[in-house]
Image (tube, grey):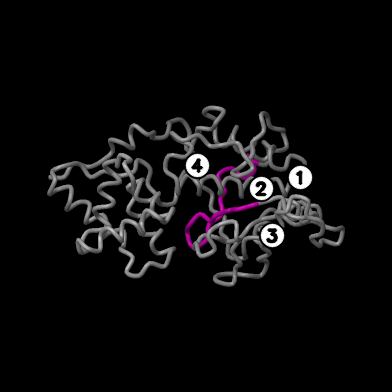
Amino acid sequence: MGAQRISPPELQAVGAVVRGASARAIPALLRALYREPVTAKALKWGDVTAISEALRWRGWRDAPLPDSLWNGKLEDARYMREPVWAPAVHSGEPDQVPPTVLTVEGELSFEDEYLPRVITGEHSHAAPEAKCALAIAARTFVLRAMRDHPTLGRSTPIVNSQRFQVFARVTTSECAAAATQTRGIVMCHGGRLILANYVTGALWTKDGVPDKDPTNTERWVTYNSGRAGTDVRPTALSLKFHPCNRGCMSQNGAEWLAVHGWNRWSILQFFYGDDIDFPRLSDARGGGLLGLAALALLGLMTE
């Protein structure tokens, strides 16, 4: 932990997690929590739901449930006569597409600027149905990232990089059309946004067989056609044991499938599994998103 300053939300989260542990066990418990990036980030956000999920993903025995952690925070806050500090953005699944997102190029309309520019930057010359499949995957990818990292796109700018998503300076009319045709549509499994990874993948032969792999990204691609539930193969590009890891799409593969008559839904299920759902989130217009100042102050005073 070093000498870094600990924020009130993080302090309350730590208190909730170690609550009930013996004094001798607490140092080892804290070292384990802060060595693990997933739980360390969850503690920093002060988000007890994310903490509980992170512990379960890592297979921790007796991982506390969110309600028990919240109750611990409430009791500690009452005892100390202070607010209950909480993240400004709920860590559950979003029910709306944000009207705008903060990027390294400034604030952009999510559906009308950012997403069309991602489609253009990632695969501008793809067939129409491949563009639509990419639009759904890219939308899901960034919304899931924003769900897991509460400041992303709000006070932390979204990067323009192959390590996240590339977005072009301008978009094409075809890429804008793909974003419009799929507006608000995301991929879910079991009611949760999936980790919608996608990569360039290998070039496919005319017979539909992955062949040369100049970008060395085929190793991440998954082929989940006909698979569902636990039979779906996760991708090593994300945590393999994460329950929302449903694989990784090949952009070259999606292009071949689209050219040969596959629609956006069947393309996505080919890579992510037959049991993927495609809900449409509402389009939140007008209104901004809570930023870091709200994150620092949001909380309910306890009586």
Image: magenta residue range: 179-198
Mark 1 — residue?
A: 126
Mark 2 — residue?
A: 134
Indicate which disc, 3 or 1, sits on the residue closer to the N terminus: 1
Relative image position of residue 150 (x, y in whole percent): 42, 43
Q: Secondary structure at mark 4?
A: strand
User: Would you identify the image quadrant in which residue 81 lies?
Assistant: top left
- Disc 3 to disc 2, C-alpha distance: 19 Å
Indicate which disc, 4 or 2, sits on the residue closer to the N terminus: 4
Residue name at image x 25 percent, y 63 percent? 25
Image quarter of the C terminus: top left
Foreground pick, 100 / 77: 77
Residue 144 left/right relative to 62 = right
Q: Amino acid at mark 2?
A: Leu
The reply to whether callout 3 and callout 4 are in contact (CB within 8 Å) is no
Indicate which disc, 1 or 2, sits on the residue closer to the N terminus: 1
Relative image position of residue 128 (x, y in whole percent): 74, 45
Relative image position of residue 151 (x, y in whole percent): 43, 39
Q: Secondary structure at mark 3?
A: helix
Q: Check the image and report above or below for 31 versus 117.
A: below
Q: Amino acid at mark 4?
A: Val
Q: Which mark is residue 97?
A: 4
Total marks placed: 4
Q: Amino acid at mark 3?
A: Arg
Q: Secondary structure at mark 2?
A: helix
Q: Amino acid at mark 1?
A: Ala
Q: Which mark lies nearer to you, 3 or 4?
A: 3
Q: Which mark lies nearer to you, 3 or 1?
A: 3
Q: Check the image and report above or below for 31 versus 283.
A: below
Q: Which mark is residue 219?
A: 3
